[in-house]
Image (spheres, helix red, strand yellow):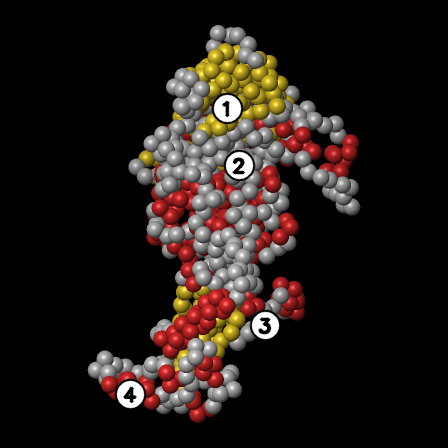
Amino acid sequence: MKYKVSFFAFLFIFSGALIAQDNEESKTQAGHKNTNNFKQLYEEFATPNRFRTASGAPGVDYYQQQVDYVMDIELDDANKKLYGKETITYTNNSPDELPYLWVQLDQNIREKDAPALEKNGSGVSPLTRVASFATKNMKDPFEGGFNIEYVRDSNGKSLKTITNQTMMRVDLPAPLKSGQKFVFSIKWWYNINDHVNDGGRSGYEYFAKDDNRAYVIAQFFPRLAVYNDVEGWQNYQFWGNGEFALNFGNYEVNITVPEDHIMEATGELQNPKEVLSRKEYQRYKQAQNTFDKPVLIVTQDEVIAKEATKATKKSTWKFVAENVRDFGFATSRRFIWDMMAVKVGDKNVIAASLYPKEGNPLWEEYSTEVVAHTLEVYSKFTFDYPYPKAVSVHAKNQGMEYPMICWNYGRPNEDGTYSDRVKYGMISVIIHEVGHNYFPMIVNSDERQWGWMDEGLDTFMQYLTEQELDPEYPSRRGEPSKIVRYMSGDQDFISPIMSNPENVFQLGPNAYGKPATALNILRETIMGKELFDYAFKTYAQRWMFKHPSPEDFFRTMEDASAVDLDWFWRGWFYSTDVVDIGLKSVKRYHISPNATEEVKEIVKNYGMTVEDLPPMVFMVSEDSEEFSEELKSNVINSEVLRNYLDENSADFEGKTLPKFFYEIEFEKPGGIVMPIIVEYEYADGSKEQVTYPVQVWRKNPDSVKKAVTSDKEIIRITIDPNAETADVDLSNNAWPKEEVKSDFDKFKETVKG
């Protein structure tokens, strides 16, 4: 296909001049601000500085605080309590003096009078699950929250504190200067919640048949809030949806539990010989160098035996973790444990799983191998996984992440059978939660403020990982068509991606689905895989073990690719606009020997006649009253054009004029600008796909005309034929116009079938 605009150029020149003339004759018009879709995001972005550069990279003065923990933890299984003591070493790497420190007390969200419990409006529901109804109206409120016994400095002297909901301010004896360290200790305990029935990211599941519990424990210790160049102190309260902003540091954690428990945790186990039986230890060592399939360290039969005997003695598991932002652990006598090694870069990483027998056969068959696959794919697109292990723990109704360990759902029926939905749901959540090791456990974004920076990036990577596992994998998020229903929904219940998680109506689509889809479109359609993958990897490697902001991501993606994306971030991340591009009109033109009345009128407005013009080619559309059937012949109905071609025959030797001339007008009812992807189908059955760059919308955001020439007759035009752009309305995507069946009509057809 050829694209020539010379035949229409004179029309555009004259029409543009006429507009200017009309403006000169009219009154002075009111001005307006720059609302162009391609306006740079200078007003939205923070100003670059020596901490964070305009390129999106850390600046020469970038800093982050270091917080190290030494902890002794004890689980009281009989009374469902957790006791702890921690010594914290806080290093002030900022240029500022700090008169106080802020400590996060996330367990306080579970206090019976916590404001977070009343953050949403509620009425009387016309229907409620029986268990929920009884619990809400008859059960005593849970006595949760930290019980702080003391906060002392390194000399044992009590420090003044004040607790504001989930934040505790520790007033220092003297301001902590830049470069100084402060050491203090906290002792606490709390009641562990039943996460299955009462909710929560951690807690226990009770198994009544054998009177045992499985614990997944996190947010279990007072943790330092982040102090940085973006927020100062990030001491926004924990309301439940916005997750965590945390510091990197080193951990030494000793955890005392019943002797027959099996445990996994953040960090490397320091005393396996002390806490494992001889047989378990031998299998544990064997697994370190087994790559083909997982090794069962604790079998299902061994677990069943322990469930019945219940040890009364205790043992202490010791873990050390370096350069992590948090710590979590899981423990139970009900855990089956398997493990294998996976090669990542030049080192071996352990992939492991813990699960009760209720998870089998699904978990034994899939979990650990999915962990290994996830590490391989994520490392390919970001950086080699730097930690020594990654662990998947089965916890009913849970999907939650911590450094090196995560909780995942997916439980078969009691007879061991399971549907594809359960199987793929389990695999997807394992990929997602293990993937969180990269975002935000290593690329350590502020989840409390920007939920999409970890959830959206991770969901995008999850989609790539699922598709590499199986090209036919039924991914729930990532494909453009999957987000259309959300984006085309009621605008009263949709928030921009750039919103705090607490202020979003539909957190799943907003923080997970839409950003993942946007990045998929950016990779597949806007930038191309090569440019996108390089820029994405650049961002991940620039900010691994650091604290990026949204601007750092946006700027890096442009800096490393030379693709201007301000229009994309504005439409997809800063607004709730939708993609809707349609065909407004299709006109077929023919060469005319005479000037049309339209041309004569244009010329007349300039005090001229057609005879005053230089040699011109005149075109007439088939819908014009001046069109005649004889113009459809292949004869060149223009004497001046014939003369020109004869006089310049050497330049056009072997060339012929296109047989068909079209003017195609595209419209954009949706607010988001996107490239126009068009498929032209010809009378001979062939097809051709053309992409007009997004910049075609820069001077007219409502409609764009394109002149198209061809030697073949166009019989059908389709916009976005492969559903690449999340277009919310397909009824205007085709010419001739096609009837688009509603979801209800499609459903009726399946019922009839």
Left or right: where does residue 522 sit relative to residue 122?
A: left
Q: Helix or strand or loop: what does disc 4 sit on?
A: helix
Please identify, in this view, whether the residue under mark 4 or under mark 1 is nearer the observer: 4
Question: Which residue in the protein does label 3 denote?
Answer: 739
Q: Is residue 72 above or below residue 367?
A: above
Question: Which residue in the protein does label 4 denote?
Answer: 643
Three-letter amino acid code of the residue under disc 1: Leu
Question: Which residue in the protein does label 2 denote?
Answer: 449
Q: Helix or strand or loop: what does disc 1 sit on?
A: strand
Which quadrant of the structure image shows residue 485? bottom right
Residue 447, percent across and down?
Answer: 51, 36
Viewer can see residue 354: no
Left or right: where does residue 659 sit relative to residue 466?
A: left
Viewer can see residue 608: yes
Give whichever of discs 4 and 1 has the lower sequence position.
1
**Is the Cβ of the residue at disc 4 closer than 8 Å to that at disc 1?**
no
Three-letter amino acid code of the residue under disc 3: Glu
Three-letter amino acid code of the residue under disc 4: Asn
Question: Which residue in the protein does label 1 denote?
Answer: 224
Q: Is residue 186 above or below residue 679?
A: above
Please identify, in this view, whether the residue under mark 1 or under mark 2 is nearer the observer: 2
Give whichever of discs 1 and 2 has the lower sequence position.
1
**Residue found 59% across the figure and 53% down from its top:** 486
Residue 183, percent across and down?
Answer: 46, 14
Alpha-carbon span between mark 1 and mark 2: 16 Å
Q: Residue furthest toward the left?
A: 650
Give whichever of discs 3 and 1 has the lower sequence position.
1
Alpha-carbon span between mark 3 and mark 2: 44 Å
Alpha-carbon span between mark 4 and mark 3: 47 Å
